[in-house]
Amino acid sequence: MTFTVAILGRPNVGKSTLFNRLVGQKIAIVDDTPGVTRDRREGDARLGDLHFRLFDTAGLDDAQKGSLAQRMSAQSMDAAKLADVILLVMDARAGVTPTDREFAQRVRKLGKPVLLVGNKAESRAALPGLGEANSLGFGEPIAISAEHAEGLDGLYEALAPFAKDESGEAQDDEEGTERDETDDPKRPLKLAIIGQPNAGKSTLVNAMLGEERMLTGPEAGITRDAIVNDWSWKGRDIKLWDTAGIRRKSRVQEKIEKLSVADALRAIRFAECVVVLIDATLPIERQDLALCDLVAREGRAVVLALSKWDAVEDKPGTLREVNSKLEDVLPEIRGVPVVTLSAMQGRGIDKLMKAVFDADRRWNIRITTSKLNRWLEGALERNAPPAPSGRRIKIRYATQANARPPTFAIFGNQLNKLPESYLRYLMNGLRADFGLDGVPIRFALRGGKNPYEEK
């Protein structure tokens, strides 16, 4: 990647649609409602043989100082300062508005190269607006339709001069990077932070990154997109997701919130370890435990974090309550690590990351077949399988079929009649003897075929 590009413009001109088109994935939430995008999103974009880093922004807005809209606009300007070139996007069908003129002035003051893009130009109705756009002083606009992938050849020609060395150096760097990633055994850990609205997820991510990268504030539900950040902790590369708050399904009514929750659920599926963040100043709710259960059902390692710990008065009592509810409601992932922290004060992050890497190690564990069957022999001697209808269930042997999460194949006869209580007995034994606390465990039951069944 040879250069960086920031997409700016007033709300609802199609910035996120253009971002999705250039990165080749629908990863930014798109809707007709103005102001859907809030946090700055980054992605690796490709246009022909051009490869570049692309910023999607909330856009520029003339809002009251200190308001959420003003904070969003400030983040957009930060992205513009980091970019080598700015794509100033306007709605070609709507023409040039007073807001477009005002923001053109603000962008001009940055002293960056600016390419004016007239989006939604797929019909003749856009021609008058494109003609007006010359008055903004950035030359003739590039007419495109991000939704229909029209006009991207013109955008390519405008961006090509900003590539440092398309023919040699850039291509060599890219190939070298790919080889390094293949040979590097320390793959980036994929870590997602989830929780209910206003639990402090973005504040925690900012504290981890050491910068005000995510929008924060007293308003609930600020984060909408699941934003991934590249981070490193003690030499280990991490893909860190900040996600929108997930409320109970019955409370989610608006379309934007539904899209945000769907984006958060996708982040869980991409992740390897998930931190479920709970506001420790509030009583623990069933929804908090339901999120832990959701992560376990997706087969991901779980760490429970109690945020705003500095504001909790009865700390021992709160910990006892949380551990008791985890034991009662989520016995299938018994031993979930519970970490206390205060993101505002930057406390507890090292403790959290130690718990995350311990959970990831357990999630990736491999147990040899010989060791597993020695353990199984002892477990069967201590508590033999039941004998439904007077015929005892036989478990012959076991092997680990997979990791991430640990999955065990059990071979024997009549395993379809093995009760859940006995599987829980085996699960708890594995957890206790092999240190699999807080990691979902799965079984694959494989019975032998009865040779007399067809006769």
Image (tube, rainbow, N blue to C red):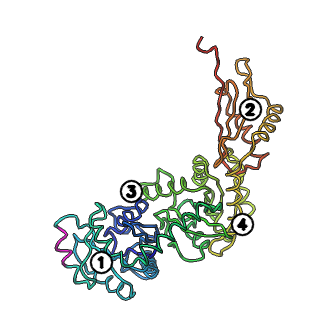
The residue that mark 1 highlights is 116
Q: Quadrant of residue 360?
A: bottom right
Pick the front one: 38 or 454:
454
Is 316 left or right of 38, judged from the image as shown? right
Above or below: residue 236 compared with residue 332: below
Q: CA distance from mark 2 to mark 3?
A: 50 Å
- Mark carried by residue 255: 3
Q: CA distance from mark 2 to mark 1?
A: 68 Å
Amino acid type for the residue under numbered disc 2: Tyr
- Give the mark nearest the N terminus, 3 or 1: 1
Amino acid type for the residue under numbered disc 4: Lys
| Contact, mark 2 vs mark 3 (Cβ under 8 Å) | no
Is 281 left or right of 143, judged from the image as shown? right
Decide whether the magenta segment is chiefly helix, strand or loop. Answer: helix
Residues in magenta, as a range: 125-131
Q: CA distance from mark 3 to mark 1?
A: 31 Å
Q: CA distance from mark 4 to mark 2?
A: 39 Å
The residue that mark 2 highlights is 397
Pick the front one: 337 or 123:
123
